[in-house]
Image (cartoon, coloured by chain):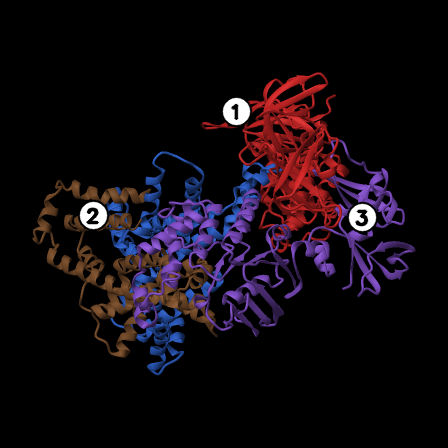
Chain colours: A blue, B red, C purple, D brown
């Protein structure tokens, strides 16, 4: 309920100042409006997308493999391993960020986009694995038997039966990982070094005060989130 | 050369410490409708899975036609399975489901050259090929199961009975040597089930394919099968036709599992003109049985016991009292107590209106010795 | 004054545009085992829910004993329900489940003072009171359903059959005037089901409580009921004892729904010494029926038709050929074709080993006119 | 896998510097060690707990009510309303933070613990509602009918049957809300004004560089999270 208000609100603030489309137009034309530098914003956005796409791609592949490993095989220490896999979901993100930062320091990697991708993959894998796992638990193994019975070998069975059936789970996992990656501020903040992603850029901008430009960007983010969610459904 | 489709030799399957199937020998002739019948946990499904290749026997060998297939993976065996849950692919249309076997195994009778080897294999991994031949076979198959023109329907649009037919079509399209059915009618309601029993039996007779059918429903087994293998605790207790199994059960387990029965225990003794079983001073006339001696049990089916005047003149005839009755419309089920306390169940078909007995009524009961069976085990 | 426990007067229940129950009048005498029997969707469960108070009839009134309860909420009615899913409270022990009714409704025969009014109500909301009286009644009840000393067990430790008994105990502990049962045996397997049928019937006879039992299983209804109300499309088609319903069905629906039947349609015509139904030149002798005229159908049950020599001398006797047979062990189900093409189903109990007919065999068939029923509707 | 490393790592860093229990001892004795001021840390922790407890309490009550409303009643615009309820889960937290900040500004509330509580309740409700809803969907309504049949009125039915049966769902929702509240940095940052919660305090501390003190606190957080998770299971 409050949210609806706050949502309306952020639009409202724009209108309230007496302007409507001017800020938008100005921003899109590449002008720096009220401390919002469109070029910096675009570069932050492109970093965000870049990181999210690469991280989601990797997380989805490894997360799905992980989910299969956990579902299909028994091995000693499986319980503990499962715990470790799910830890990034449970650990406070600040701790996660610092841990990763320390790790990169020790390993000696230069902070930047690539470390951010690694960090995002680290927690993305967990989310994908959780979602795909729950999907796999409800997966009817006799479908695979039926496929083999009809002459499909292991690979063909996976290609034509297993993968298509669990696809919704994989997609949901990927979407979740994307949302998490795109939205993440805390972890990224520690490990991205001098580059900016959208949340970090935005955070920095807001710290200097709320301006109409901020509202415009916030509105754009909300709208694009909504569009993404609708597309996903 | 041989006329059998399946031969099992000493097949044993153990899971950890549990023995699911123990030393089963079985030969199934071509074109037979064989039913594996037994209570749940008797190993009948495990045995079926050994034939299809989903389980590898711990010991023993499996032959299909003349080929040793004990260690052949399921996708290279010439068998098809109809699963209890149907296991239809939910993401494919009806047509795609039925076509799947053709696309994977190839079209029977038309060996295409590029199927073997890495090339064909890889090609198949990229795209399921479709051709007019495949389409035609699929259409024929859907015709056969009486669901023509349903190719483009989604699986979840179909009713349970229709899904059952599609599962059948999918399994039959590759023209397997043997069709394996794992309680395929278990999920259907009673009426549909009875119809499908008849249809399945007719289909099997028309196609002449060997069917191996797994069920725990003895009525289903009696209705459909050419041969029934009654299983218990991983072993086959008796193998025979429906009539043999019902009328001449080999063991107490078979007698009690198939239909209802009255079991009477006593001492077997041969007489001048036959044999009797003696229990608490009373002698029951039974058929002479070569292997019988000492303490035995004999079985007489409830419908073979006569009540009232019809009992007169039979070689077993006793005074009795009705102690319980259940009215079932077409028959009355009576529990009678003989004068020495022995209880018997009697099924009397109500062949005329009002033909019935009340609790407390004294009626003679009787049965012919020929209608009883001495169980030696 | 009155001896009925339930009286329904013109009860109609509509959901949006669907009429689930239409103008039902029904009086149930005290101590009766009444079964509402019908196919799914016939309104039998809706009718039951009107009696229990979960549904309020759109029209008509419901009386329990002499009280008008049409608009009384379920928790103030003197009825108890046994649900198909049992609806046992999973977070309570067996004992707590059974005690729940006593704690909420109070202990029958012991009206405590502080129950009425806000005080008792509020007190009940804070804590379920327990007392030695409650414990004792719970123990008695568990004894009655043959699960003594299970008070502290968790619900999910029990098997399906045991849960069924606990559901029964929970419903009976408040000593309701009427016990309502909504397909309570539907989730049990066949063997357990048959046992529970007998037990339920015995329990009802011992307690003398009125049972209203809903089922779609005609065999269950015939076995257990004092009275059966056959429902179809929201209306009661026939109300009567098991024998009346089976032997003298009032309508075609009843004849076909209860058991199997052969229906033959033709023109009814009275003769000097009785009546016949004429179909394609052939006359079938039927019992004289006051209301019958013009085009009618008559029914004859498969077990009332005789084959072979037994058909001789019956007032309906025709030459016929066996066209299909199903062996069921205790009986043979034959489809015979009369020489004019009319098909009949015949159930022949196999009373002697080898007593059987093959497809293609020519056998006379016959039945007595007294064993057929002319259906006027 | 990476996580296990990073987890080990953060401990390792402590050891690596050549100390083991000294920092812990020092911190617990209330000394300011390497820029970590234990008093500030404790006050941040107590703020965190205070906010989390109050927010979780309110979110659980309102979230459960909301879930019931969505499950049991049909009303015009229900779909839209459901969307609004779930929005806080979907919206990027930065946008959520700014929206709330604007809202409080307009309403004229002074930022502080109470606004933070309101903010946390705003998203806590959503999480509780989602979890309880899914539990309610699988709830067997005939249990309620059975209770009524046995003489329990509406209130008694809820008290003795409905509530106990869905309790695991409510508890899970509350736990999730607690974890979210305790972990949240971004939303809190915008609306808490001059007070600190643990993540914010920690963030500020880390910005000045990683010290052994930071590691000690991080380790403590991880350990306490683990303990909480274990307790919850």
The picture places residue D80, in percent across and down from the top left corner, at 45, 71
- Does residue A51 appear left or right of residue B301 in this picture? left
Can residue B95 be seen?
A: no
- Residue appearing at x 49%, y 53% in the figure: A168
Same chain shared by disc 1 and disc 2:
no
Can residue D153 be seen?
A: yes
- Among the 4 quarters of the image, the one containing residue D204: bottom left
The picture places residue C94, in percent across and down from the top left corner, at 39, 50
Residue beneath disc 3: C344
- Does residue C263 appear left or right of residue D104 in this picture? right
Question: Disc 1 versus disc 2: distance between alpha carbons?
Answer: 52 Å
Badge 2 density bin: few <14, some 14–19, many ≥20, Cα 10 Å: some
Chain of the residue displaying label 3 = C
Q: Nearer the viewer, residue C215 or B238?
A: C215
Give the label, 3 or 2, closer to the camera.
Answer: 3
The picture places residue A19, in percent across and down from the top left corner, at 36, 81
Residue beneath disc 1: B58
- Does residue A136 appear left or right of residue C293 in this picture? left
- Among the 4 quarters of the image, the one containing residue D116: bottom left
- Residue appearing at x 7%, y 53% in the figure: D31
Residue beneath disc 2: D219
For the residue labelled by badge 2, is the local secondary structure a helix, a strand or a loop?
helix
Q: Nearer the viewer, residue C177 or D216?
A: C177
Q: Nearer the viewer, residue A179 or B167?
A: B167
* Quadrant where the image shows the C terminus of chain C: bottom right
Same chain shared by disc 3 and disc 1:
no
For the residue labelled by badge 1, is the local secondary structure a helix, a strand or a loop?
loop
Badge 3 density bin: few <14, some 14–19, many ≥20, Cα 10 Å: many
């Amino acid at each position: 309920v409050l949210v609806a208000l706050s949502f309306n609100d952020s639009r409202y603030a724009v209108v309230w100042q007496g302007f409507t489309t001017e800020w938008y137009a100005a921003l899109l034309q590449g002008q720096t409006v009220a401390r919002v530098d469109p070029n910096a914003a675009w570069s932050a956005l492109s970093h965000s997308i870049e990181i999210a796409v690469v991280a989601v791609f990797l997380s989805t592949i490894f997360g799905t493999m992980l989910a299969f490993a956990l579902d299909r095989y028994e091995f000693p220490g499986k319980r503990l391993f499962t715990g470790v896999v799910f830890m990034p979901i449970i650990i406070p993100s600040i701790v996660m960020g610092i841990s990763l930062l320390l790790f990169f320091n020790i390993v000696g990697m230069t902070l930047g986009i690539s470390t951010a991708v690694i960090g995002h993959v680290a927690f993305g894998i967990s989310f994908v694995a959780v979602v795909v796992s729950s999907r796999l638990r409800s997966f009817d193994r006799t479908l695979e038997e039926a496929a083999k019975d009809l002459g499909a070998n292991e690979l063909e069975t996976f290609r034509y039966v297993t993968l298509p059936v669990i696809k919704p789970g994989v997609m949901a996992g990927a979407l979740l990982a994307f949302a998490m990656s795109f939205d993440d501020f805390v972890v990224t903040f520690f490990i991205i070094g001098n580059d900016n992603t959208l949340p970090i850029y935005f955070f920095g901008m807001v710290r200097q005060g709320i301006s109409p430009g901020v509202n415009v960007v916030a509105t754009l983010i909300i709208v694009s989130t909504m569009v993404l969610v609708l597309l996903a459904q | 050369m041989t006329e059998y489709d399946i031969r099992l030799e000493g097949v044993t399957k153990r899971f950890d410490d549990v023995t699911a199937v123990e030393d089963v020998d079985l030969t199934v002739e071509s074109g037979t409708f064989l039913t594996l019948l037994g209570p749940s946990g008797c190993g009948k499904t495990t045995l079926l899975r050994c034939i299809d290749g989903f389980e590898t026997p711990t010991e023993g060998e499996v032959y299909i036609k003349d080929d040793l297939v004990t260690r052949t993976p399921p996708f290279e065996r010439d068998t098809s399975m109809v699963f209890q849950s149907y296991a239809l692919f939910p993401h494919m249309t009806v047509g795609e489901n039925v076509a799947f076997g053709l696309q994977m195994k190839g079209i029977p009778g038309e060996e295409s050259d590029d199927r073997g080897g890495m090339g064909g294999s890889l090609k198949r991994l990229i795209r399921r090929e479709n051709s007019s031949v495949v389409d035609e076979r699929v259409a024929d198959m859907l015709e056969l199961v009486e669901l023509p023109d349903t190719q483009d329907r989604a699986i979840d649009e179909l009713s349970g009975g229709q899904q059952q037919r599609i599962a059948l079509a999918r399994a039959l399209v590759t023209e397997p040597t043997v069709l394996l059915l794992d309680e395929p009618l278990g999920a259907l309601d009673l009426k549909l089930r009875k119809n499908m029993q008849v249809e399945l039996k007719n289909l099997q007779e028309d196609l002449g394919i060997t069917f191996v059918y797994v069920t725990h429903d003895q009525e289903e087994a009696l209705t459909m099968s050419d041969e029934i293998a009654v299983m218990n605790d991983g072993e086959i207790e008796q193998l025979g036709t429906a009539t043999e199994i019902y009328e001449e059960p080999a063991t107490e387990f078979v007698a009690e599992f198939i239909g209802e029965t009255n079991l009477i225990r006593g001492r077997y003794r041969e007489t001048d003109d036959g044999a009797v079983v003696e229990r608490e001073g009373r002698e029951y006339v039974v058929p002479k049985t070569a292997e019988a001696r000492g303490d035995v049990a004999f079985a007489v089916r409830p419908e073979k016991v006569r009540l009232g005047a019809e009992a007169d003149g039979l070689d077993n005839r006793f005074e009795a009292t009705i102690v319980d009755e259940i009215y079932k419309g077409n028959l009355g089920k009576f529990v009678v107590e003989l004068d020495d306390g022995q209880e018997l169940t009697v099924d009397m078909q109500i062949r005329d209106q009002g033909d019935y007995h009340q609790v407390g009524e004294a009626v003679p009961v009787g049965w012919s010795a020929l209608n009883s069976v001495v169980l030696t085990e």
